[in-house]
Protein backbone atom coordinates (compact mmCIF):
# COMPACT_ATOMS: atom_id res chain seq x y z
CA UNK A 1 0.00 0.00 0.00
CA UNK A 2 1.18 3.52 -0.62
CA UNK A 3 2.01 6.03 2.08
CA UNK A 4 -0.68 8.41 0.92
CA UNK A 5 -3.75 8.44 -1.24
CA UNK A 6 -5.87 11.30 -2.50
CA UNK A 7 -9.20 11.86 -0.84
CA UNK A 8 -11.99 14.39 -1.03
CA UNK A 9 -11.42 17.54 1.00
CA UNK A 10 -13.31 17.85 4.25
CA UNK A 11 -15.83 20.64 4.74
CA UNK A 12 -15.19 20.82 8.47
CA UNK A 13 -13.91 24.01 10.02
CA UNK A 14 -10.66 22.27 11.01
CA UNK A 15 -9.13 22.45 7.54
CA UNK A 16 -9.12 19.72 4.95
CA UNK A 17 -8.18 16.08 4.98
CA UNK A 18 -6.08 15.64 1.84
CA UNK A 19 -4.01 12.57 2.65
CA UNK A 20 -4.88 9.05 3.68
CA UNK A 21 -1.87 7.79 5.63
CA UNK A 22 -0.53 4.26 5.46
CA UNK A 23 -1.91 3.70 8.99
CA UNK A 24 -5.34 4.81 7.78
CA UNK A 25 -5.10 2.49 4.78
CA UNK A 26 -4.01 -0.42 7.02
CA UNK A 27 -6.95 0.24 9.34
CA UNK A 28 -9.41 0.27 6.42
CA UNK A 29 -7.80 -2.88 4.97
CA UNK A 30 -8.47 -4.81 8.17
CA UNK A 31 -11.75 -3.13 9.18
CA UNK A 32 -13.87 -3.92 6.13
CA UNK A 33 -16.18 -6.92 6.68
CA UNK A 34 -15.62 -8.35 3.18
CA UNK A 35 -12.82 -10.62 2.05
CA UNK A 36 -10.46 -8.77 -0.31
CA UNK A 37 -8.00 -10.45 -2.67
CA UNK A 38 -5.45 -8.54 -4.79
CA UNK A 39 -4.56 -10.48 -7.94
CA UNK A 40 -1.71 -9.99 -10.38
CA UNK A 41 -2.21 -9.87 -14.15
CA UNK A 42 -2.06 -13.68 -14.31
CA UNK A 43 -4.89 -14.19 -11.76
CA UNK A 44 -2.51 -15.17 -8.93
CA UNK A 45 -3.24 -14.04 -5.37
CA UNK A 46 -0.66 -11.52 -4.21
CA UNK A 47 -2.31 -10.06 -1.12
CA UNK A 48 -5.39 -10.77 0.99
CA UNK A 49 -6.91 -9.21 4.08
CA UNK A 50 -7.81 -10.88 7.38
CA UNK A 51 -11.39 -11.62 6.30
CA UNK A 52 -10.09 -13.39 3.20
CA UNK A 53 -7.63 -15.38 5.31
CA UNK A 54 -10.46 -16.41 7.62
CA UNK A 55 -12.69 -17.36 4.68
CA UNK A 56 -10.14 -19.63 3.00
CA UNK A 57 -9.14 -21.14 6.34
CA UNK A 58 -5.43 -20.72 5.66
CA UNK A 59 -3.03 -17.82 5.34
CA UNK A 60 0.24 -17.81 3.40
CA UNK A 61 -0.47 -20.96 1.40
CA UNK A 62 -2.85 -19.08 -0.95
CA UNK A 63 -0.29 -16.44 -1.93
CA UNK A 64 0.82 -17.17 -5.48
CA UNK A 65 -1.98 -19.56 -6.43
CA UNK A 66 -4.61 -18.73 -9.02
CA UNK A 67 -7.83 -17.26 -7.64
CA UNK A 68 -9.85 -19.40 -10.05
CA UNK A 69 -7.98 -22.49 -8.82
CA UNK A 70 -9.00 -21.60 -5.26
CA UNK A 71 -12.64 -20.62 -5.86
CA UNK A 72 -13.52 -22.47 -9.07
CA UNK A 73 -15.80 -19.62 -10.11
CA UNK A 74 -17.25 -19.42 -13.60
CA UNK A 75 -19.70 -17.03 -15.19
CA UNK A 76 -21.57 -16.95 -18.47
CA UNK A 77 -19.66 -14.79 -20.91
CA UNK A 78 -20.62 -13.11 -24.15
CA UNK A 79 -21.47 -16.50 -25.63
CA UNK A 80 -23.30 -19.25 -23.77
CA UNK A 81 -20.05 -20.89 -22.67
CA UNK A 82 -18.75 -20.37 -19.15
CA UNK A 83 -15.54 -18.49 -18.49
CA UNK A 84 -13.45 -17.37 -15.56
CA UNK A 85 -14.73 -13.96 -14.39
CA UNK A 86 -11.14 -12.71 -14.03
CA UNK A 87 -10.52 -13.49 -17.72
CA UNK A 88 -13.73 -11.71 -18.66
CA UNK A 89 -12.83 -8.69 -16.50
CA UNK A 90 -9.34 -8.55 -18.04
CA UNK A 91 -10.67 -8.72 -21.60
CA UNK A 92 -13.50 -6.18 -21.12
CA UNK A 93 -11.82 -3.89 -18.58
CA UNK A 94 -15.12 -3.75 -16.70
CA UNK A 95 -16.46 -4.90 -13.36
CA UNK A 96 -17.73 -8.51 -13.34
CA UNK A 97 -20.13 -9.60 -10.58
CA UNK A 98 -21.17 -13.11 -9.61
CA UNK A 99 -24.20 -12.54 -7.35
CA UNK A 100 -24.24 -16.07 -5.94
CA UNK A 101 -21.52 -18.73 -5.95
CA UNK A 102 -21.49 -21.89 -3.83
CA UNK A 103 -17.96 -22.71 -2.69
CA UNK A 104 -16.60 -25.45 -0.41
CA UNK A 105 -13.46 -24.82 1.60
CA UNK A 106 -10.84 -27.61 1.90
CA UNK A 107 -12.33 -28.67 5.25
CA UNK A 108 -15.72 -29.24 3.58
CA UNK A 109 -17.43 -26.10 4.95
CA UNK A 110 -19.77 -24.68 2.30
CA UNK A 111 -20.34 -20.99 1.71
CA UNK A 112 -22.65 -18.97 -0.49
CA UNK A 113 -20.63 -16.03 -1.76
CA UNK A 114 -21.05 -12.93 -3.89
CA UNK A 115 -17.92 -11.99 -5.86
CA UNK A 116 -17.05 -8.68 -7.53
CA UNK A 117 -14.03 -8.54 -9.85
CA UNK A 118 -12.58 -5.03 -10.29
CA UNK A 119 -9.78 -4.31 -12.78
CA UNK A 120 -6.59 -2.62 -11.52
CA UNK A 121 -4.93 -0.22 -13.92
CA UNK A 122 -1.70 1.72 -13.59
CA UNK A 123 -1.25 4.51 -16.12
CA UNK A 124 -3.97 2.90 -18.24
CA UNK A 125 -2.30 -0.53 -18.30
CA UNK A 126 -3.97 -3.60 -16.77
CA UNK A 127 -1.89 -4.84 -13.81
CA UNK A 128 -4.34 -7.19 -12.10
CA UNK A 129 -7.58 -7.17 -10.23
CA UNK A 130 -9.23 -6.80 -6.87
CA UNK A 131 -11.85 -9.34 -5.87
CA UNK A 132 -14.33 -8.38 -3.16
CA UNK A 133 -16.02 -11.44 -1.66
CA UNK A 134 -19.11 -11.13 0.52
CA UNK A 135 -20.22 -14.17 2.53
CA UNK A 136 -23.98 -14.52 2.02
CA UNK A 137 -24.29 -17.82 3.91
CA UNK A 138 -26.00 -16.50 7.07
CA UNK A 139 -28.27 -14.06 5.23
CA UNK A 140 -29.40 -16.74 2.78
CA UNK A 141 -30.09 -19.21 5.62
CA UNK A 142 -32.29 -16.61 7.36
CA UNK A 143 -34.12 -16.03 4.07
CA UNK A 144 -34.67 -19.79 3.66
CA UNK A 145 -35.97 -20.01 7.26
CA UNK A 146 -38.48 -17.23 6.57
CA UNK A 147 -39.61 -18.98 3.39
CA UNK A 148 -40.02 -22.28 5.30
CA UNK A 149 -42.07 -20.51 7.96
CA UNK A 150 -44.26 -18.91 5.30
CA UNK A 151 -44.89 -22.32 3.70
CA UNK A 152 -45.72 -23.81 7.10
CA UNK A 153 -48.15 -20.99 7.80
CA UNK A 154 -49.83 -21.48 4.42
CA UNK A 155 -50.13 -25.25 4.88
CA UNK A 156 -51.28 -25.28 8.52
CA UNK A 157 -55.03 -25.31 9.27
CA UNK A 158 -54.51 -22.95 12.24
CA UNK A 159 -51.23 -21.20 11.48
CA UNK A 160 -49.30 -20.02 14.51
CA UNK A 161 -45.60 -19.40 14.08
CA UNK A 162 -43.35 -17.85 16.72
CA UNK A 163 -39.85 -16.46 16.23
CA UNK A 164 -37.14 -15.55 18.73
CA UNK A 165 -35.31 -12.19 18.75
CA UNK A 166 -32.82 -13.36 16.11
CA UNK A 167 -35.56 -14.43 13.69
CA UNK A 168 -35.14 -18.15 14.27
CA UNK A 169 -38.40 -20.09 14.21
CA UNK A 170 -39.30 -21.49 17.64
CA UNK A 171 -42.33 -23.55 16.59
CA UNK A 172 -45.13 -23.71 14.06
Image (cartoon, grey):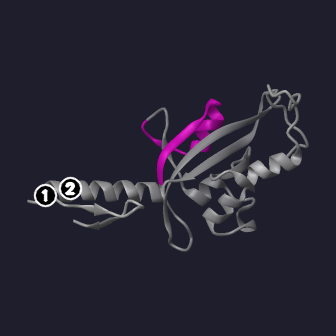
Image quarter of residue 47 = bottom right
What residue is at 13 percent from the left and 57 percent from the top? 155
Tell me, yes or no, whether the highlighted magenta stretch contains residue 85. Answer: yes
What residue is at 51 percent from the left and 48 percent from the top? 74
Q: Which residue is mark 2?
A: 151
Q: Depth check: give the residue in front, 65 or 145.
A: 145
Q: Residue furthest front?
A: 13
Q: Is residue 46 visible?
A: no
Neighbours of disc 1 within 10 Å: few (<14), some (14-19), many (20+): few
Task: Find numbered disc 2 in the image and state the secondary structure of the residue it sits on.
Answer: helix
Q: Is residue 8 left or right of residue 50?
A: right
Neighbours of disc 2 within 10 Å: few (<14), some (14-19), many (20+): few
Q: Identify the disc placed on residue 155.
A: 1
Task: Say above or below: 65 vs 1.
Answer: below
Point out the image quarter for the C terminus: bottom left
What residue is at 63 percent from the left and 69 percent from the top? 57
Task: Find numbered disc 1 in the image and state the secondary structure of the residue it sits on.
Answer: helix
Give the magenta range.
Answer: 80-101
Amino acid sequence: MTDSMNSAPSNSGNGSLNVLTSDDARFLWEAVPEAIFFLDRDNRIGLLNGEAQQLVGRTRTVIGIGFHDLMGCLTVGESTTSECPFTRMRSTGELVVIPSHIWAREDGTQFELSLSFWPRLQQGVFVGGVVIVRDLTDAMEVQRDVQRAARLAEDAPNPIVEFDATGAMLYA
